[in-house]
Image: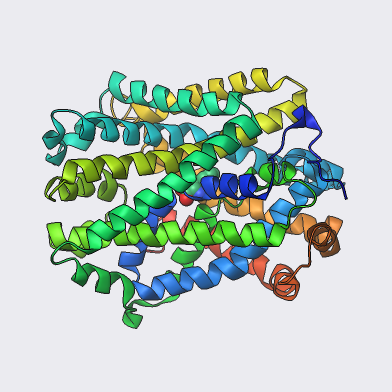
Amino acid sequence: MSGKSNKTTAGAGFSGKMGYVLAVAGSAVGLGNIWRFPYLAAKYGGGTFLFTYLALAITFGFTLIMTETALGRKTGKSPIGAFKVLGAKKMMFGGWINAIVPMLIVPYYCVIGGWVLKYFVSFAGSNASSLQEDTYFNNFVSKTGEPIFWFLLFTVAVFVIIIMGVEKGIERASKILMPLLVIMAIGIAIYSVTRPGAMEGVKYYLIPDFSKFSINTVVAAMGQMFYSLSIGMGVLYTYGSYMKKDIDMESSIKQVEIVDFVIAFLAGLMIIPAVFAFAGGNPETLQAGPSLMFITMPKVFLSMPMGRIIGMIFFILVFSAALTSAVSLMESGVATFVERTKWSRKKSSIVMLGIILLLGIPCSLGFGVWSFIKPIGGSILDFFDFITNSIMMPLAAICTMILVWKVCGFNTIVQEVEASSKFKRKKIYLFIGKYLVLIFLGVILISSILQAFGFMKL
Ligand code: PHE
């Protein structure tokens, strides 16, 4: 067992367990935790949803993360290389789909990252009060130059971290941003739950309402878990390939899951009680998806004492979360190019930058001058979001599990985990991996397609 990373390309790798855990947690903790989790929890019966989510994360989520990570570390490759090394000749499609998903997500993720940056700067600026206006958000996103400017700024920040390399860029950024994020989240959550009237919100969030429990709760929690843990998008393979052979994989992944859940949980405590105290806790408002973050929350903050400062901290927190997630997506793309083309890291990063600009600018314009382009009925951004999250990601994970099942066998995974430590949850892993996970992935895929075409309402 060597202490070195087995990554052959570019010789990159994380320095140790801490660097690895923080970088993967950085990828996992993102917009999904901060706005998506709280509104889903509000919609699906509070505590009931929390419990369902947690149960799924430590069983199915755990199985999928362990599999992708072990395959990455074993082969030392990003997805396409991993499928190839393992001899999956007939299913190279699986490697490709895992590799392409992050390239399609990162452009639109950077567009939203740009909006977050704009909101942070606006809270800091002199006319922060205009953020309260109902039309502010729509006016902003429908402009041409301004959102693109913020998108470019966010993208450059991602690019700079990538170009600095895995250890000096990604690991260092995660080591600074993640602890900061946790502190800010705890601070805002405490402030929010101690506002007069906030307790109603805390109750709404935490007390289980079993009357709202249905199969939809489970399907929604599954989809959220998938997205939040960055499963099915090549990221876990790539970061796994940068992990040293002597690091305890199981305990690292447990820690990532804990951080991911804690941040999602705290996000609920930041948002739901504040909405109760300052906006009457109207469930419609809480369940409104994206507008919760960009329309409701600014209003809520600006009606609180010290609201501008809280708003600034909130958006810098969201910015940090989005930045480390975007970095992981871009890195996955860069690793694919380095490996498949033998281009240098620098050249591969520039090509990835080109892809981000090429796809990101139309996503941004899709809210303004190009809003007449409506692939499958929504905006251009919605389109990318749909094909990646609802179709390609579950498919990518299905391919990974078939690879293990049909080609390399579950023993390959077990051996890779046991190369560095005891595999404590091996029995659960094998049971879920062999008998349940494909059914579960099939349910996600089918339900998200039905939902998108209006046959099922979540
Ligand atoms: N897991 C991130 C979140 O919760 C989203 C993400 C998607 C990150 C894809 C990386 C890759 O927001």
Is any part of residue 47 visible from this angle? yes
Horizontal relation, residue 340 to residue 120: left or right? right
Q: How many marks?
A: 0
Residue 400 percent coordinates (x, y): 72, 53
Quarter of image, res 43: bottom left
Identify the residue at horizontal 63%, vertical 64% (top origin).
62
Q: Residue at x 31, y 78 (%)?
A: 207
Residue 433 picture location, percent across and down: 71, 67
| Residue 76: quadrant of the picture | top right
In the rendering, at what x and y percent does residue 215 appear? 45, 74
Q: Position of residue 102 (x, y in %)?
A: 58, 38
Occupied quadrant, residue 280: bottom left
Of residue 230 and residue 255, the one placed in the foreground of this image is: 255
User: What sort of colour scheme is used for the picture?
Assistant: rainbow
Q: Is residue 338 left or right of residue 133?
A: right
Is 435 placed above or below 32 here? below
- Compare residues 188 and 336 and report the one nearer the observer: 188
In this view, the residue farthest toward the bottom is: 210
Residue under the image location 53 percent in, 73 percent down = 55
Is residue 270 left or right of 357 when viewed as pictured? left
Asked whether the viewer can see residue 383, the reply is no
* Placement of the C terminus among the 4 image quadrants: bottom left
Is the residue 221 above or below the residue 51 in the image?
Answer: above
Depth check, front residue: 188 or 378: 188
- Tell me which residue sits at (47%, 39%) in the image: 384
Q: Is residue 215 left or right of residue 130?
A: right
